[in-house]
Amino acid sequence: MHLDANGRELFAGNRVTMLQPDETWFSYLTADAYAILQAACKAPLTLAYLDDDARIALELPPTLESDGDYVTHSRTVNASAVLLVAA
């Protein structure tokens, strides 16, 4: 069972917010991509899937690479590091 910081059960498709997004997660990206992803981490995100060991994967917005292609992103965190916003 995957529970958020308040003990509510999480399911794929839920919207959650991260309690403390890490500011170094995307430091290897361009400044624009970094800003987009850091802002997204502070807003409600969709829970993409449940991992083993009470970890969850969150969908992040795509960013534009230097070659003009869009790249998708996700972040895996402990379920207890998020709050359920909407089921």
Image (spheres, helix red, strand yellow):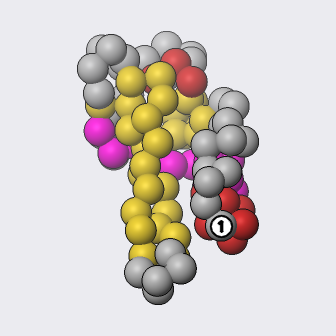
Residue at position x 67%, y 36% from top? 22
Magenta highlight on residue 83:
no
Q: Residue at x 40, y 63 (%)?
A: 72
Query: What residue appears at the point 66 percent right and 60 percent down from the top-left corner?
Result: 34
* Residue 73: x %, y % from top left: 44, 56
The relative height of residue 26 versus residue 61 in the rendered view (above or below) is above
The C terminus, quarter of image? top left
Q: Circle 1: is it few (<14), some (14-19), or many (20+) Cα within 10 Å?
A: few
Q: Quadrant of the N terminus?
A: top left
Decide: is 51 above or below 12: above
Seen from the viewer's position, the closer of residues 76 and 11 is 76
Give residue 15's position: percent from left, percent from top: 47, 44
Q: Give the quarter of the image for residue 21.
A: top right
Whether the magenta-drawn stretch holds residue 44 is answered as yes
Residue 36: horizontal and vertical position, in percent?
A: 64, 64
Image vertical order of residue 62 relative to residue 49, above or below: below
Residue at screen point 61% across, 60% down: 29
Which quarter of the picture shows residue 85? top right
Tell me if residue 14 can be seen. Answer: no
Residue 60 seen in the current view: yes
In the image, 25 versus 18, the foreground residue is 25
Q: Indicate the amino acid at tag 1.
A: Thr
Horizontally, is 38 left or right of 51 in the view? right
The segment highlighted magenta reads 38-49
Q: Secondary structure at mark 1?
A: loop
Q: Which residue is mark 1?
A: 30
User: As rendered, which of 32 and 16 lies closer to the eye?
Assistant: 32
**Picture coordinates of residue 3, whole percent (x, y):** 43, 18
Report the number of numbered marks: 1
